[in-house]
Image (tube, grey):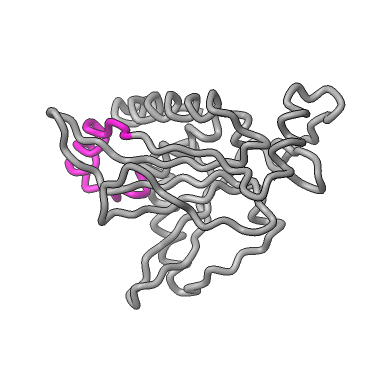
Amino acid sequence: MAFRWIDMETFPRRAHFDYFSSLAYPYVGTTANVDITALLSKVKTEKLPFFLSACYCAARAANCVPELRQRIREGRIVEYDRCRVSHTVALEDGTFCYCTLEDKPDFYAYLKEGRRAQEEAKRHASIEENQEEALEKFFVSSLPWLSYTALIQPVPNPADSNPRITFGKYFPQEGKVLLPVSLLCNHALVDGRHIADFYHALELELAAVTAGEEHE
């Protein structure tokens, strides 16, 4: 995937990058309940896969925020033009495997490719990923059995810089259907404002999909 190196000499968050990179746990994240009422109606009416539909919106939202496309490489920062998704797929034995989804602008093409990729991932049933190839990805997973308010993620040592997006179990509240969505990022790259930008972009992507206005 195409990327550019960030000039660390002029990078405005250089001091923040150095400080948070020195911490044992440099991550920052939150969980927010996102309104998916319209999306769920579309999914049920058209019999679409819910996870892939939500994943499409979340991936596009994350790609809208430049800081979420940044990664730490060789002690410096690279920014990818676009990032793909590596997500979990449940297996019949109760475990899971990893599946990579290609970035496609068309919603229905994404769902079609997603179904194919998931079936292929099930055949391989692997959680192994090449570290170099995984660098540009968003890590997406779900906890569809529980509506939670907070989530603690396992993270590697030394710390990585891939944003992690997780969906909980959606639930009704005051006439709406809400979905817990967690975002965990490396604070050396991402601040609270950028996290808020992701949730705002997610709202826009959900509205675009349900209105049939997905765009490049």
Relative to 100, is 1 on the left or the right? right
Residue 7 shown in magenta: no
Predominant secondary structure in magenta? helix
Give residue 209's position: percent from left, percent from top. Answer: 34, 31
Relative to 44, is 93 on the left or the right? right
Image point (66%, 50%), residue name: 24
Q: How many marks?
A: 0
Image point (18%, 43%), residue name: 44
Give residue 13's position: percent from left, percent from top. Answer: 73, 26
User: In front here: 206 or 47?
Assistant: 206
Relative to 14, is 194 on the left or the right? left
User: In front here: 16 or 62?
Assistant: 16
User: In front here: 105 or 140?
Assistant: 140
What is the residue that sits farthest to the left in this orientation?
175
- Does residue 80 show up? no
Image point (33%, 75%), residue name: 92
Q: Is residue 76 above or below residue 95?
A: above
- Does residue 156 show up? yes
Residue 150 location, quadrant: top left
Residue 48 shown in magenta: yes
Chain part drawn in magenta: 33-53
Q: Is residue 184 above or below residue 153?
A: above
What is the residue that sits farthest to the right in this orientation?
9
User: In front here: 11 or 206?
Assistant: 11
Give residue 23's position: percent from left, percent from top. Answer: 68, 45
Image point (39%, 51%), residue name: 112
Q: Quadrant of the N terminus?
A: top right
Give residue 110's position: percent from left, percent from top. Answer: 43, 45
